[in-house]
């Protein structure tokens, strides 16, 4: 009996399709995803790409918020230390205002204040991960530098700008308070107040004006900390929203792409049965055994 070559070709094509279907189901089972290529479900694949893009954006916003939170916490910690140093300077200024102090006592207080000034210079140049916290947007520039031409011996090298970071779609938060708004530009602000207090002690004049300046600077630092605190509260709220959005988007991704294991197992059994039936037909048509196709 002669075999119709067209029948043989059709059977072999059908076997190829059965093998492809079986492999497709095996891939779904092993990967846990029913969409391996867009052709598996064009509409579902398009929807999946959109949801994945939304989730990637949400994760980027979350990363931005986490990095900004760390930066603000570092700035607030530095400003807390600044406040403590200024409180000590204020106490020394009040102490130095006692007219009964000796020259030696006033000199000792002035020396301690000089140490506080150095400490404040170090704190004003605080960094996080290699970038400066109080340089405005010039985060790679050391904000405060010693300058013999400045009346306070210090000058500001940063700028008066603030970075903005997107922590949600069209939702931006100021990332920093520039140093000039906290410490001044060197000719005024914190370093002038400390310098004026040192000068008053060294010249044996009243410290009232200088201690008043120190007190103003304490208030200015406190205001900056309030700004950071409000921003961190906003960030915390944003992080909670982003976390909820991520969970919801992940669920959507799972709903769109996750393999229905029970259905896939049933499809695998069906495809295996169909494949074996085709092999049997082909074997009988060609007068060969099933093992000729399995090996």
Image (cartoon, helix red, strand yellow):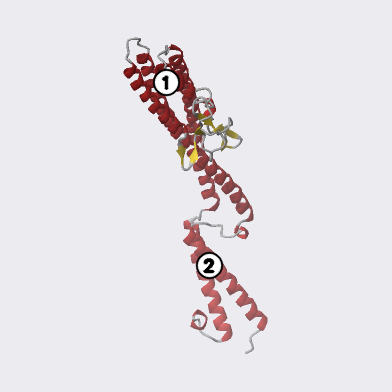
Q: Nearer the viewer, residue 48 or 217?
A: 217
* Residue appearing at x 54%, y 46% in the figure: 252
Q: Please state the total of marks drawn on the protein image.
A: 2
Residues at circles 2 and 1 in contact by the CB criterion of under 8 Å: no
Question: In terms of sequence position, does the residue under pointer 2 or pointer 1 come before the other?
Answer: 2
Mark 1 sits on what residue? 198
Residue 243 makes an appearance in the image: no
Q: Nearer the viewer, residue 45 or 16?
A: 45
The image quadrant of residue 202 is: top left
In the picture, the disc for residue 23 is 2
* Residue appearing at x 51%, y 46% in the figure: 250
| 204 horizontally vs 286: left or right | left
Q: Nearer the viewer, residue 178 or 277?
A: 178
Residue 275: where, in percent of width, then height? 53, 72
Q: Residue furthest right?
A: 6
Q: Up-down: is 207 above or below 1?
A: above
In the picture, the disc for residue 159 is none
Residue 211 makes an appearance in the image: yes
């Amino acid at each position: 009996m002669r075999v119709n070559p067209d029948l043989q070709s059709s059977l072999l094509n059908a076997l190829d399709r059965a093998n492809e279907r079986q492999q497709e189901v095996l891939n779904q089972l092993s990967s846990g995803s029913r969409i391996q290529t867009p052709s598996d479900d064009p509409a579902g694949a398009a929807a999946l790409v959109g949801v994945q893009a939304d989730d990637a954006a949400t994760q980027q916003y979350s990363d931005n918020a986490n990095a900004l939170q760390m930066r603000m916490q570092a700035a607030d910690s530095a400003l807390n230390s600044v406040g403590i140093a200024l409180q000590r300077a204020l106490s020394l200024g009040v102490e130095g205002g006692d007219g009964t102090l000796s020259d030696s006592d006033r000199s000792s207080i002035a020396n301690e204040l000089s140490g506080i000034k150095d400490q404040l210079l170090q704190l004003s140049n605080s960094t996080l991960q290699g970038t400066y916290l109080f340089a405005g947007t010039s985060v790679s520039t050391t904000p405060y530098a010693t300058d013999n031409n400045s009346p306070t011996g210090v000058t500001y090298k940063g700028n008066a700008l603030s970075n903005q970071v997107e922590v949600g779609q069209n939702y931006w938060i100021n990332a920093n308070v520039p140093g000039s708004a906290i410490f001044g530009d060197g000719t005024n602000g914190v370093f002038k107040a400390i310098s004026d207090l040192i000068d008053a002690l060294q010249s044996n004049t009243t410290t009232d004006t200088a201690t008043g300046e120190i007190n103003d600077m304490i208030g200015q630092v406190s205001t900056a900390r309030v700004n950071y605190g409000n921003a961190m509260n906003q960030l915390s709220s944003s992080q909670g929203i982003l976390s909820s959005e991520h969970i919801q988007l992940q669920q959507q991704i799972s709903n769109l792409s996750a393999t229905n294991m029970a259905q896939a197992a049933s499809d695998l059994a069906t495809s295996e049965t169909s494949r074996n039936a085709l092999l049997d037909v082909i074997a009988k048509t060609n007068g060969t055994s099933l093992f000729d196709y399995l090996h």
